[in-house]
Amino acid sequence: MKFFIDTAVLNEIKKAADYGVLDGVTTNPSLMAKVGIKGREAILKHYKDICELVPGNVSAEVISTDFEGMMKEAHELAAIDPKIVVKVPFIGDGVKAIKALSDEGIRTNCTLIFQPMQAVIAAKAGASYVSPFIGRLDDIATDGMQLIRDLTLIFKNYNFQTEILVASVRHPMHMVEAAKAGAHVATIPFAVIEQLFKHPLTDSGLTKFLADYEASQK
Ligand code: G3P
C-alpha cells in the first residue's frame, strides 16, 4: 500500500518524506486554507514548493464547478510540475473533465467519493485515483471501510487500472483495515503518521535492551 500524506503544511511533508517511505501528497482547499495561503499566485507557488519536497505525486484540487472552469484550472495546475495530479470533485461536470483530461494524458484524482458507483463512474471516465472519504462516512454512523472493501472487489472484477486512494483517515486502525482490504493508497494526516511510529511495547522494549546493555558494561 502506498502512503500519501494529507496536508499542505511544508514541514509536515518534509518530516514525513525524511522517513523515506512517503509516496505522495494530497491536499484540498480546506487544507490549503489552513496553511493561510492567500491569492492564486501564492497557491500555485505553494504547490510547486510541495512538489520539490516529495518524490511521488501531489494532488492539487480545482475550485471551479463547471467544465470549462475545471479544464482551465486543470491545465494551470498540471503546468506547475509533472508530479501534479488534478483533483476533481465527483459532480457531473467533474466526470466530464476527468474524461477530457484523461484523453489528454493528464492524471486526475476524483474526490468526495461516498458510494461505490461514484467510484466506478470516475474509473470509467479514466481517473487515475478515486478518493473515498471513510472518516466522514464513519462520522454519520456508516461503515466507511465497507466502501473500501466493496471497491477493491468491484475494481478487481472489472480490472480497473484506477487506484483506490483511502482518504479521510482518522486513526491507525483505518490504515490496518485499508491494507487488509487491499487498497492501493492511503492518504494520512501527519498526526496519524506520528501515531504509526509509536508503539508502547517497542519503546519499553528498547528502553530495557539499552538498560541491559549498560548494565553488562559495568
Ligand atoms: O483530503 C481529503 C480527505 O482526506 C479529508 O479528510 O478529515 O477532512 O474528512 P477529512
Image (spheres, grey):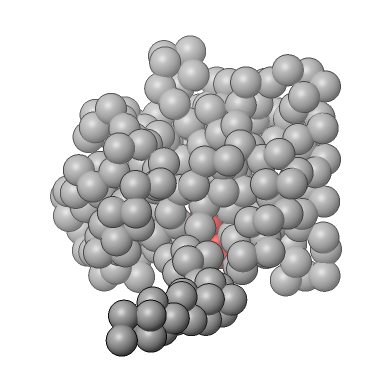
210 lies above or below 125: below
Q: Is residue 160 left or right of residue 78?
A: right
Tell which of 109 and 66 is nearer to you. Answer: 109
144 lies above or below 147: below
User: Residue at horizontal 68%, vertical 56%?
Assistant: 176
Tell which of 130 and 165 is nearer to you. Answer: 165
In the rendering, at what x and y percent does residue 179 appear? 67, 47
User: Residue at horizontal 29%, vertical 68%?
Assistant: 35
Tell which of 104 and 56 is nearer to you. Answer: 56
In the rendering, at what x and y percent does residue 8 appear? 33, 59
Q: Is residue 135 left or right of residue 46?
A: right
Which quadrant holds the N terminus?
A: top right
Image quarter for residue 184? Answer: top right
In the rendering, at what x and y percent does residue 134 appear? 69, 57
Which quadrant holds the C terminus?
A: bottom left
In the rendering, at what x and y percent does residue 178 appear? 69, 50
Is residue 62 visible in the rendered image? The answer is: no
